């Protein structure tokens, strides 16, 4: 179900479009704001014909809704929810789009040495990350870790069947938005330029008058405060950080991002932004690099020529500053970042 919505300041995305509305008098800037995949989606299309632009936006929203219908684990009727309920050792036939996606998820799991692993539903439940947070007992945490990991699935690519080998469950939080934006881009690229901001991950197609989309990257702790502005002419920006959703449990801050290798939630002061031509890869890597941390994450980005930017707070309180730690590929793609930090 889609509804128009507004988002409280505390839930503003790390990355947001800051292109001025007044600059879009010709062509018309046609917008939609809907709520899907558990977050706000803002769609902006520059159209010479407003009615045609609205029809195109409606088709774009339908594309996002179709992905949500397949991947959202908040919906009981999605393909992933059906898989999470499937009895152990009984194979399930995957829809063709999910079948194609599965191989990529497992490939990135291997490529990141387990830093990306979406099969952590048991850990998420143990820590109460869909509730208000809790500290699990050692026994419950050990039981959750025992059924965490993509290795607990058997996938038959030739038949598109997947089998749960244990009570393992998937969570689409580290790839669902990216896959939705990638599908949208493949279906809707070309023609008049547009931008979609899906819960802070941005993808663009084409460029507006002036040549690019201005994008603001927020302070890692104060999401209403812009740290740096860059311009985006293609691809997708995805950001991961602890301030998006976190809880205080027994005096300890617990973030919504889990390290699948240790079973522990991460609460780091830094945020990481990844640019990639492929929105799915940007989403996956922003999570994986956050799990790795600035030192190992930047080393991974350097080795794989990835465009990644860590924002690291220095000091506390109102006088705290932010250090920009950018990979060579990020500085090359966004030269302005080199003028704002190290």
Image (tube, helix red, strand yellow):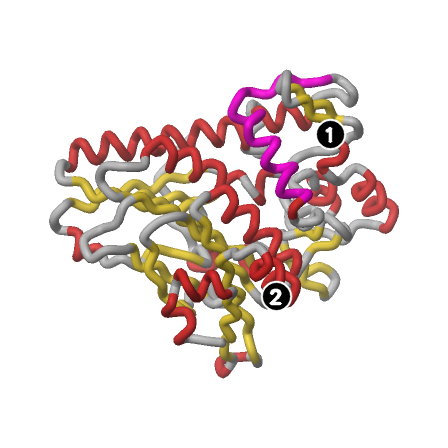
> In the rendered view, does 197 fall on the left or right side of 342?
left
Q: Does residue 265 appear in this view?
A: yes
Q: Does residue 242 appear in this view?
A: no
Q: Position of residue 203 (x, y in %)?
A: 38, 46
| Mark 2, residue position | 294
> In the rendered view, does 227 fall on the left or right side of 116?
left
Residue at horizontal 13 percent and vertical 51 percent from the top: 25
- Circles 2 and 1: CB atoms closer than 8 Å: no
Task: Specify the farthest residue to the bottom.
Answer: 319
Badge 2 element: helix
What kind of secondary structure does the magenta stretch mostly adopt?
Answer: helix
> In the rendered view, does 213 fall on the left or right side of 340?
left
Decide which of 74, 80 is in the foreground and name it.
Answer: 80
Q: Quadrant of residue 17?
A: bottom left
Indicate whether 171 appears above or below 251.
Answer: above
Task: Residue 153: give its label.
Answer: 1
- Of marks 2 and 1, which one's residue comes earlier in the chain? 1
The stretch in magenta equals: 91-110
Residue at horizontal 55 percent and vertical 74 percent from the top: 313
Residue at horizontal 58 percent and vertical 44 percent from the top: 174
Q: Quadrant of residue 149?
A: top right
């Amino acid at each position: 179900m889609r509804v128009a919505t507004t988002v409280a300041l505390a839930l503003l995305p790390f990355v947001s479009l800051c292109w001025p509305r007044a600059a879009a008098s010709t062509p018309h800037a046609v917008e939609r704001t809907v709520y899907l995949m558990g977050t706000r989606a803002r769609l902006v299309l520059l159209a010479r014909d407003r009615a045609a632009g609205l029809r195109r936006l409606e088709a774009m929203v339908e594309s996002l809704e179709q992905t949500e219908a397949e991947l959202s684990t908040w919906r009981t009727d999605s393909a992933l929810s059906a898989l999470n309920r499937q009895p152990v050792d009984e194979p399930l036939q995957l829809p063709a789009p999910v079948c194609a996606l599965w191989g990529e998820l497992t490939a990135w799991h291997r490529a990141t040495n387990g830093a990306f692993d979406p099969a952590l539903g048991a850990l998420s439940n143990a820590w109460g990350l869909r509730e208000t947070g809790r500290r699990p007992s050692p026994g419950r945490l050990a039981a959750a870790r025992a059924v965490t990991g993509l290795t607990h699935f058997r996938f038959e690519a030739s038949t598109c069947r997947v089998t749960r080998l244990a009570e393992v469950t998937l969570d689409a939080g580290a790839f669902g938005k990216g896959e939705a934006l990638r599908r949208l881009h493949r279906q809707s690229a070309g023609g008049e330029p547009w931008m979609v901001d899906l819960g802070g991950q941005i993808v663009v197609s084409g460029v507006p008058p002036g040549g690019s989309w201005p994008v603001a990257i927020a302070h890692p702790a104060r999401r209403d405060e812009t740290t740096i502005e860059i311009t985006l002419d293609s691809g997708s920006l995805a950001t991961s950080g602890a301030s998006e959703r976190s809880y205080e449990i027994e005096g300890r801050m617990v973030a919504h991002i889990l390290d699948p290798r240790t079973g522990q939630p991460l609460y780091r002061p830094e945020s990481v932004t990844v640019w990639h031509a492929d929105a799915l890869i940007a989403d996956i890597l922003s999570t994986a690099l956050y799990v790795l941390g600035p030192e190992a994450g930047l080393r991974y980005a350097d080795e794989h020529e990835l465009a990644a930017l860590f924002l690291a707070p220095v000091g506390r309180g109102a006088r705290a500053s932010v250090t920009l730690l950018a990979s060579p590929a990020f500085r090359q793609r966004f030269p302005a970042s080199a003028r704002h930090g190290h």
